[in-house]
Image (spheres, rainbow, N blue to C red):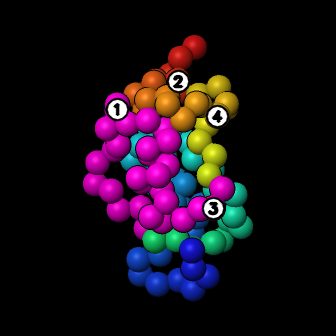
Amino acid sequence: MENAKDESMVTIEEFERKIEEKEGISVIFRVPSKTMVPDYDFQRAAPRNMSVSDFKYLRLNKYVGDCEVVIVDGSHRQPHGRTKMETLRESYYDE
């Protein structure tokens, strides 16, 4: 994570918003809101059969390293690491 802004960096707030738009899930990073990170540059959403643990490891670690990351489901709970992305995404639409 960086403190200086350049063309390819965004605030962690913007980063969280981009993940929500691309992936359809809510991710919260436990860092100051103005922390700068590389822009989220995945072109496609994570595969629906990817686990939450793999998503954190394969998609988020390259941007934020080992900073604390909280993924929440549609009930504002933290899903188990083996939960599939498809199940997580669907939880936002369950009644």
Labels 3, 2: front one: 3
Tell me: 69 left or right of 8.
right
Instruction: Identify the disc placed on residue 78.
Output: 4
- Give x and y (percent) for residue 4: 57, 85
What is the spatial separation of the Cα atoms under label 4 and label 3, in whole angstroms? 16 Å
Quarter of image, res 71: top right
Labels 3, 1: front one: 3
Quarter of image, res 72: top right
Mark 4 or mark 3: whose residue is earlier in sequence: 3
Instruction: Identify the disc placed on residue 29.
Output: none
- Give x and y (percent) for residue 44: 29, 48
Given contact means CB atoms under 8 Å apart, are the residues at marks 3 and 2 in contact?
A: no
Given contact means CB atoms under 8 Å apart, are the residues at marks 4 and 3 in contact?
A: no
Mark 3 or mark 1: whose residue is earlier in sequence: 1
Residue sticking out furthest to the top: 95
Mark 3 or mark 2: whose residue is earlier in sequence: 3
What is the spatial separation of the Cα atoms under label 4 and label 1, in whole angstroms? 18 Å
Given contact means CB atoms under 8 Å apart, are the residues at marks 4 and 2 in contact?
A: no
Mark 1 or mark 2: whose residue is earlier in sequence: 1
Given contact means CB atoms under 8 Å apart, are the residues at marks 3 and 1 in contact?
A: no
Labels 1, 2: front one: 1
Give me the residue at 34% from left, 32% from top: 48
Instruction: Identify the disc placed on residue 91.
Output: 2
Q: Amino acid at mark 2?
A: Ser
Which stretch is magenta? 39-68
